[in-house]
Amino acid sequence: MSKKVIVIGSGFSSLSSACFLAKAGYDVTVLEKNDSPGGRARKFETQGFVFDMGPSWYWMPDVFDKFFASFGKKTSDYYNLVRLSPSYKVVFGKENELLVPSNINEFYAMCENLEKGSAKKIEQFLKEAEYKYQVGINELVYKPSHSLLEFADLKLLNGIIKLDVFKSFSKHVRSFVSHPKLIELLEFPILFLGALPENTPALYSLMNYADIKLGTWYPMGGMFKIVEAMVSLATELGVKFKYNQNVVKIVSEGKKATGVQTETGAYFADIIVSGADYHHTDTKLLNGSRNYKDSYWEKRVMAPSSLIFYLGINKRLKNLLHHNLFFDKDFKIHANEIYTNPQWPSEPLFYVSCPSVTDKTVAPENCENLFILIPVAPGIEDTETIREKYYEMVMDRLEEITEQKIRENVVYKKSYAHNNFISDYNAFKGNAYGLANTLKQTAILKPALKNKNLNNFFYTGQLTVPGPGVPPSLISGEVVANEIKKEFAL
C-alpha cells in the first residue's frame, strides 16, 4: 500500500525529493507557501521583462544531467542549454578587466600572460581540483551524514590528504599563483560559501574545476526553465501541487508526525519532508519536537544575504556580458564586512547579470534585463533608505566603468533583500544561500536531515546536507528520498 508523503516547499531540494519518492511509488503532495513553484528560484514578469529572482549561474551540468537521467530523461527534453563564451567578465576597474575564456587553452594563455609560469601551475591546481570534484560531488555529497562511519571507506581515507579538508583555501590558492588578479579569480567561486577564503577548506577548489573546466551554462528562457522542467517531471510521476499553502504547524502524536496544518486546512501524511527553511521549521512549526535549541542556531555561521535590484532598461547597453563581476574595490574589506564584522559594506563588490545579452526573450526588443546583486551580511538592518543608498552607489560605478548612462533609462525597478527573504521564505536572518560551508559545518556537523524526536520527519535543502547551491540542493532531495525509502519501504 502506498504511503502518503507531504513535502513542504517547492524549491529545488523539495522538487527533487518529490520526484524520487513519486518514482518509488509514494503518494506525494507538495505544499507551497507562495503562488508559484521554485522557492528562491521563482520568476516574475512585468512590462515584457522576465526576471529570474534568484540563482543565475548554471554550473555543474553533470549534476542536472544525472538528475534527469534517473528518470529516463535528458535536460534537452525540457530546455535548450547553451555554454557561455566567454564564461564571464571580471572587472577590476575602468578599462581593466578579464574576459574569462570558456576554452581551457585560452584560459591557460590568459593566466600565463598575467603571471609567467602560472599556466602549468594552474593546470596542476585544476588536476587536483578535478579529483576533489569527482570524490566530493560524486561520493561525499551523497552521504546522509548520520555518522563518521559513512566516510570510513578506504578510498576516502586514502584520499583525505588529496582532498585538502584541513588546509585553507587561501593558502592553497597562493601556493600556485601570486598575481592578485589570478588570486581573486580563483577565490571568487567560494565567495558565497559563507566564510573568508582563509577559513574555507581547500576542498572547495572543486568549485574552480566546475567553473573553469565544466563551464558556465544558461538554459534559454531563464533559470526558471529548470523549475518548470522539474514540476513537469514531478507531475508526470503523479506528484500533486498545492499553492498558497502556508504551513503553520506540524501535527504529531508521540514519536510520529501525523500531518500539517496550513492557514487554510489540514493535510495528513505518513511521512513529512520539510524543504522550508530549517530554522523556521525547527523553531516555529515543530513545537516540542524540534531538533535544536535557540543557542545552537545562534552559533550557526550563515552564508551571505543579498541586496538585489531587478531593472528593466529601455535601451541596449554596451560593455556588459551575460555575467559580470565588479571587483573594482578591495575584496578583503568587503569579505570582512560580510563574515567577520557584519555590517553594510563600505565599498561593495557586486555582480551584474544581463541575460538579455544571450536571450532576447527575457526583455522587450531593444531593451535589457539587469539583475544586480550585492552580497551582504545576514541579520543586519534592512530599510528602503539603505537600499536606495546602495543603488546609487552601485549605479555610479556601473555607469562610470561601462561608460554609459543607465539610470535615466530604467523603466522598471524592484529591490529585494533581507526582509523579502524572511517574508517570502522564512529565511533565518534573511540569508540568501543557507548555511556557510566552514569546516565546523561540514558533513555530520551540519543540521541533521532527520528529526530526532519524530521518526517520520525529515529535512532537505540548503541548511542540511550536502549544503547550499542549486546542484547540492538537487542532491539533498535525492539523499533524503533514499533515506525514506530505506526506512519506510513500500
Image: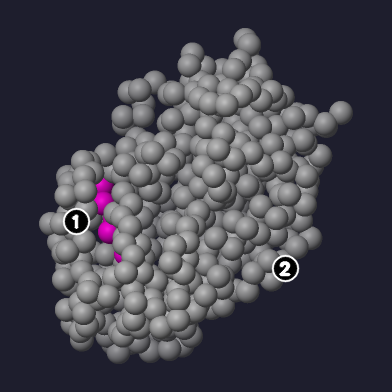
Tell me which corner region of the image, top left, top right, bottom left or bottom right, holds residue 92.
bottom left
Q: Which residues are magenta?
A: 372-377
Q: Name the residue located 72 percent from the left edge and 68 percent from the top edge.
A: 77
Q: Residue furthest left?
A: 346
Q: Which part of the image, by quadrant, shows the N terminus?
A: top right
Q: Is residue 373 magenta?
A: yes
Q: Position of residue 402 (x, y in %)?
A: 23, 81
Mark closer to the chain start, 1 or 2: 2
Give 449 or 55, whichever is nearer the viewer: 55
Q: Residue at x 17, y 64 (%)?
A: 392
Q: Amino acid at mark 2?
A: Asp
Seen from this angle, which residue lies furthest top? 254
Which label number is shown at residue 77? 2
Whole-percent x and y of residue 375? 29, 56
Q: Give coordinates of residue 285: x percent, y percent.
A: 49, 23
* Res. 431 image quadrant: top left
- 101 relative to 390 in the view: left or right: right
Residue 255, magenta (yes or no): no
- In this orientation, does residue 258 appear? yes
Question: Which quadrant does the C terminus fall into?
Answer: top right
Indicate whether 145 appears above or below 86. Answer: above
Task: Find residue 226 and report its horizontal and vertical position in percent.
Answer: 59, 60
**Prevailing secondary structure class for the magenta stretch in the rendered image:** strand
Contact, mark 1 vs mark 2 (Cβ under 8 Å): no
Q: Nearer the viewer, residue 463 or 437?
A: 463
* Mark 2 closeness class: few <14, some 14–19, many ≥20 residues within 10 Å: few
Rendered position, 37 above or below 262: below
Which label was assigned to residue 388?
1
Mark 1 residue type: Glu
Q: Foreground residue, 251 or 46?
A: 46
Identify the residue at image location x=48%, y=29%: 281
Task: Using the numbered discs, state the Cα–Cα distance from disc 1 to disc 2 in whole angstroms.
Answer: 42 Å
